[in-house]
Image: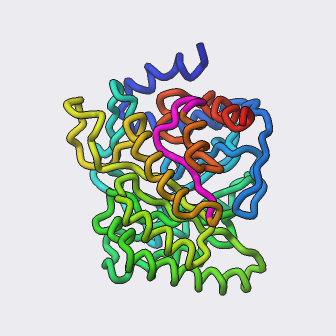
Amino acid sequence: MSLYALARPLLFSLDPETAHRVTLQLAGFLPYAAVPPCPVRVLGLQFPNPVGLAAGLDKNAEYIDALAKLGFGFIEVGTVTPRPQAGNPRPRLFRLPQAQALINRFGFNNVGLEAFVRNVARSRYRGILGINIGRNADTPPERAADDYESCLDKVYSHASYVAVNISSPNTRGLRDLQQKDQVENLLARLSTRRERLAERHGKHVPLVLKVAPDLVPEQVSGIANAVRRHGIEGVIATNTSVSREGVEGLPHANEAGGLSGKPLRERATRVLKLLESELRDEATLIGAGGIFTQSDAREKVAAGASLVQLYTGLIYRGPGLVAECVSAFRAK
């Protein structure tokens, strides 16, 4: 039995958000995980292995060095917004252990750009770092692109890639940015801003778009067209779901927020397959959502993913899941 399997009952006896914080604090005391190399080159970057940490676990970039010990091929931190915000009131994180799922309605709680960038700069990690950006909850929808541009300006020099989060269900109106005209406008502005930043900093930082699992094929097609037209290098499929399919009747199933974990797997993979059929080799696809086993990681690869990301699976399975999923790629 793994050390995490022994610790999990104690962690699950705590309030979920408290357990989240305690786990991050304890991660710094762990030895470095022995994860066999499985190098892959995508996004113009050399990844030591294709299994990464999804955004949301380390919202404020405070635990990058500790999380690097778990053997990830890349780490994504955030979501960060221009100004600090408290997010939604607690409780805002709920376990559904019978379904191996979580529901969260954090609402982009974070320390804001200035403190976030200071945390990144303090880190000793020199691996591949994704920075996930969003808009403030009180920013009018018509000014949303301004927030994303402000974030891109500040994080550009620190990021290996920048993830543009337009798919969290916990900021009112955010998912509207996935509609055809809005995603077109946002990506056009970010692509133009990125060109200026590349000249200023002397490096080209890839942009990836994080989308929802609740999209219909017409929406996926519109997003894919915008990604192609504006040279966006990747898409993360997917964020959490507003659907409650697979958790009906369970305690906390009716809480507002985004559902993650095992019940999300099929929905996320469906969107991944749709993106693959639209984009083929024109953008790197990153599979996320419901990865709990080597087989789940293989499913994402078969659907078109070149990389995968973990979050809820780590909560239920522990850090040994990283090496298990890397083995899915080594077996290809």
For this view, does 270 lie left or right of residue 207? left
Q: Quadrant of the C terminus?
A: top right
* 290 falls in the magenta region: yes
For this view, does 301 lie left or right of residue 9? right
Residue 55 seen in the current view: yes
For the residue pair 331 and 204, the one nearer the viewer reads as: 331
What residue appears at the point 40 percent right and 26 percent down from the top-left corner? 12
Q: Quadrant of the N terminus?
A: top right
Residue 39, given in percent of the width and then of the height, sits at 79, 46
Residue 124 seen in the current view: no
Residue 24, given in percent of the width and then of the height, sits at 55, 39
Quarter-wise, where is residue 116 in the image? bottom right
Quarter-wise, where is residue 118 in the image? bottom right
Residue 289, given in percent of the width and then of the height, sits at 47, 43
What residue appears at the point 59 percent right and 56 percent down from the top-left corner? 285
The single residue placed furthest to the front in the displayed view is: 277
Q: How many marks?
A: 0
What residue appears at the point 63 percent right and 42 percent down from the top-left corner? 67
User: Relative to 108, is 295 above or below?
Assistant: above
Residue 146, given in percent of the width and then of the height, sits at 45, 82
Quarter-wise, where is residue 184 in the image? bottom left
- Range of residues picked out in magenta: 283-295
For the residue pair 60 and 248, the one nearer the viewer reads as: 248
Colouring of the image:
rainbow
For the residue pair 33 and 274, the one nearer the viewer reads as: 274
